[in-house]
């Protein structure tokens, strides 16, 4: 599902964020991406999201080389990838419902299907009864659940998360991990970048460990 073949990423000025990464995540796999701050975790996720392109090597998703995607195909590709951010990126001038509906509206989803899709996503994260409230009134854990609902409302095949529990206490972090596990159990490939090592062991999942832009653990299973 996700394959990196000798991928490097260098930025102007010579900084090499990633160096010769090779690994393969199978369809439906659940994996963690770990490493110190600046190790390259966010850069790796951005390559999958097509927010960045590699300087060398290939990123393949479901066998398709992202380097070869035409510009016009990128919006369609991104609909297959859900993304959850640490800081939610919610719009506080809109309701919970409108925040979750926005990706469907932007992509031109049939208007008649939007309410069903939005409410199904909110139901999955336990917030169906909060659809009309402003997200600024919600707790951090509830705001993160809104972010997850927005990420999965497209029914993506891949779900990425960048430090999704960074602002949450251990109990809420465990609840968020349970949600990711639930989506994985219905076939979604999940990759989570995290500093929260305490969460990883109970999950029993593969860990891809980055150190100064190099993969130093988890890649042997590629």
Image: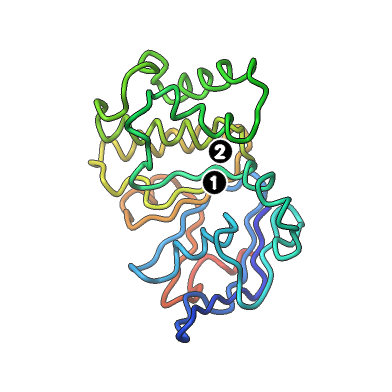
The numbered mark, 1 or 2, whose residue comes first in the sequence reads 2
Residue placed at 47% from the left, 30% from the top?
A: 149
- Residue at the spot 55% in from the left edge and 75% down from the top edge: 9
Taking 116 as reference, is 72 above or below it? below
Q: Circle 1: is it few (<14), some (14-19), or many (20+) Cα within 10 Å? A: many
Give me the residue at 49% from left, 76% from top. 214
The quarter of the image holding the C terminus is bottom right
Determine the secondary structure under disc 2: helix
Residue 133: give x, y in percent of width and height: 32, 19
Considering only vertical position in the picture, is 93 above or below 38? above
Q: Position of residue 52 (x, y in %)?
A: 56, 64
Say which of 6 and 220 sits in front: 6
In this view, the residue in front, 32 or 154, is 154
Residue 174 coordinates in the image, percent (x, y): 33, 38
Q: 27 or 138, which lies in front?
A: 138
Residue 117 location, quadrant: top right
Q: Badge 1 is on which residue?
A: 190
Q: Does the CB distance between marks 1 and 2 fall below 8 Å? A: yes
**Among the 4 quarters of the image, the one containing residue 53:** bottom right
Determine whether, in the image, residue 95 is placed left or right of residue 185.
Answer: left
Residue with the mark numbered 2? 184
Q: What colour scheme governs how the chains and residues are painted in the rendered image of this protein?
A: rainbow
Q: Is residue 10 left or right of residue 36?
A: right
Neighbor class of circle 2 (other Cα within 10 Å; few <14, some 14-19, many 20+) is: many
Is 131 situated left or right of 170 in this image? right
Q: Position of residue 76 (x, y in %)?
A: 69, 44
For marks 1 and 2, give the CA distance: 6 Å
């Amino acid at each position: 599902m996700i394959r990196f073949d000798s991928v490097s990423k260098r930025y102007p000025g010579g900084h090499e964020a990633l160096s010769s990464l090779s690994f393969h995540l199978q369809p439906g796999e659940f994996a963690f991406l770990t490493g110190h701050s600046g190790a390259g975790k966010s850069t790796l996720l951005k390559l999958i999201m097509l927010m960045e392109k590699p300087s060398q090597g290939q990123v393949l998703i479901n066998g398709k080389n992202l380097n070869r995607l035409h510009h016009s195909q990128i919006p369609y590709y991104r609909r297959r990838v859900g993304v959850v951010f640490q800081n939610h990126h919610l719009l506080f001038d809109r309701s919970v419902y409108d925040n979750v509906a926005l990706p469907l509206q932007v992509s031109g989803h049939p208007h008649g299907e939007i309410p069903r899709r939005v409410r199904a996503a909110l139901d999955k994260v336990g917030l169906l009864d909060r659809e009309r409230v402003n997200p600024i009134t919600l707790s951090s854990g509830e705001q993160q659940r809104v972010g997850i609902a927005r990420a999965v409302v497209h029914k993506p095949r891949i779900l990425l998360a960048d430090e999704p529990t960074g602002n949450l206490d251990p109990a809420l972090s465990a609840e968020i991990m349970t949600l990711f596990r639930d989506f994985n159990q219905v076939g979604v490939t999940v990759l989570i970048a995290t500093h929260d090592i305490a969460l990883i062991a109970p999950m029993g999942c593969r860990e891809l460990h980055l150190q100064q832009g190099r993969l130093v653990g988890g890649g042997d299973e590629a």
